[in-house]
Image (cartoon, rainbow, N blue to C red):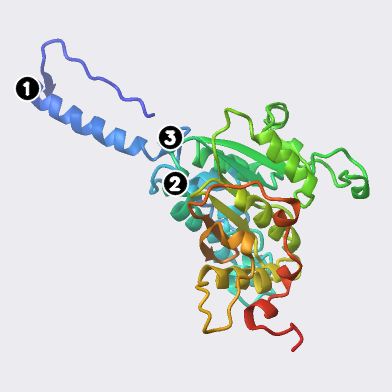
């Protein structure tokens, strides 16, 4: 909070230009000044203005402050932690001015040319903000899949301070061949200042989010008697269709009623492998959301285990949020917790035809 200075007068008046100002006038002036300072202080988080913009010098990758955003604005918080989830609006202008400045200049859609610089702040402010942001939210558990260097994790913790925040990361596995359940490419998570503390407190879980046994272990570790309900899961992991679908099928039924499951980076580009998730998985989910079951028309539920718990799906570019209905969470069998065989073969369920017809 900003500090204010109190002005004292020995005789109850302050002299200005040879005239005496009554105390009542001074009190009014001080009240206005303090109110202004308090209003401005609401724009601060940890002493830093919440809104920030990227330095317009294209050679700089630092962010400078501006003061025009409300408390718990995910864009401003994300900029303060350095996560790429909110960098899209600051990378895009350089792409539009000079194609050579774009990470993905070959893409036809201009907003896709920002590469790993995303525009997720609008979705997070609109969908997560009303439920979870700020100090007035009810305590809840959240699980992030894909800790990496922890910048996104830090943004979520600041945005949602009432969350018991967990994260699942593959790179903190012991070094070695993946065929042996290890990780050969270095420990990215160890760069984080609180790495060991998060490990020791059982908040950072090491393992492969595409491995069923790992998911069961992590869920067991999270389910302590005193733990608040699991209300939020965010997949920012491998950006591979198979992994994304497994996240939804395993975690969605286990979310508490009213919870949200987020899948980021649904980018249909050569460098990622989310094409099947976009082209096959999502259309089947959308069909199920609108299912009525009229016997007069051919119709079927594509994903019964998800449909039972599904309230809605909200998508913006490269990000979707799946909302839970009020059906209580369930512990499903292994078969029910994994994607079915047709998860990436949409035509039979959508149209009643084989994919190659």
Q: What residue lies at 8% left-to-right and 24% top-to-bottom?
A: 24
Q: Residue furthest bottom?
A: 357
| Disc sitting over residue 135 in the figure | 3
Residue located beneath label 1 in the image: 22
Q: CA distance from mark 2 to mark 3?
A: 11 Å
Q: CA distance from mark 2 to mark 1?
A: 49 Å
Mark 3 vs mark 1: which is more N-terminal?
1
Could you say where residue 297 lies in the image, as x and y percent from the top left? 54, 84
Rate crowding at label 2 as few (under 14), some (14 to 19) or many (20 or more) other CA atoms within 10 Å: some
Q: Which mark is residue 131?
A: 2
N-terminal label among 2 and 1: 1
Quote the CA–CA distance across marks 3 and 1.
Answer: 41 Å
Kindly tell me whether residue 149 is visible in this rendering. no
Q: Dot 2: what SS?
A: helix
Callout 1 crowding tier (Cα within 10 Å): few <14, some 14–19, many ≥20: few
Residue 47 visible in image: yes
């Amino acid at each position: 909070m900003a500090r204010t200075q109190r002005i004292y007068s020995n005789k109850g008046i302050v002299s200005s230009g040879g005239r005496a100002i009554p105390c009542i006038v001074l009190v009014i002036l001080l009240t206005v000044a303090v109110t202004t300072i308090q209003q401005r202080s609401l724009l601060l988080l940890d002493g830093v203005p919440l809104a920030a913009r990227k330095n317009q010098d294209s050679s700089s990758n630092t962010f400078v402050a501006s003061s025009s955003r409300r408390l718990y604005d995910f864009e401003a918080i994300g900029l303060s932690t350095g996560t790429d989830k909110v960098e899209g609006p600051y990378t895009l202008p350089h792409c539009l001015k000079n194609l050579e400045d774009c990470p993905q200049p070959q893409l036809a859609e201009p907003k896709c040319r920002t590469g790993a610089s995303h525009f997720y702040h609008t979705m997070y402010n609109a969908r997560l903000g009303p439920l979870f942001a700020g100090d007035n939210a009810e305590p809840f558990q959240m699980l992030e899949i894909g800790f990496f260097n922890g910048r996104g994790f830090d943004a979520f913790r600041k945005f949602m301070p009432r969350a018991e925040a967990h994260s699942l990361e593959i790179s903190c596995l012991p070094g070695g061949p993946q065929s042996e359940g290890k990780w050969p490419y270095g420990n990215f998570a160890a760069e984080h200042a609180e790495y060991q503390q998060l490990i020791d407190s059982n908040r950072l879980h090491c393992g492969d989010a595409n491995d069923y046994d790992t998911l069961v272990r992590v869920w067991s570790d999270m389910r302590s008697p005193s733990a608040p309900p699991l209300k939020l899961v965010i997949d920012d992991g491998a950006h591979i269709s198979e992994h994304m679908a497994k996240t939804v099928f395993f975690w969605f039924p286990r979310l508490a009623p009213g919870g949200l499951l987020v899948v980021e980076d649904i980018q249909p580009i050569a460098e990622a492998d989310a094409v099947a998730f976009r082209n096959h998985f999502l259309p089947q989910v959308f069909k199920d959301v609108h299912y009525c079951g009229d016997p007069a028309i051919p119709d079927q539920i594509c994903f019964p285990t998800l449909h039972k718990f599904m309230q809605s799906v909200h998508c913006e570019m490269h990000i979707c949020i799946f909302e839970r209905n009020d059906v209580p969470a369930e512990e499903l069998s292994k078969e029910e917790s994994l994607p079915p065989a047709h998860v990436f073969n949409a035509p039979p369920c959508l149209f009643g035809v084989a994919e190659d017809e």
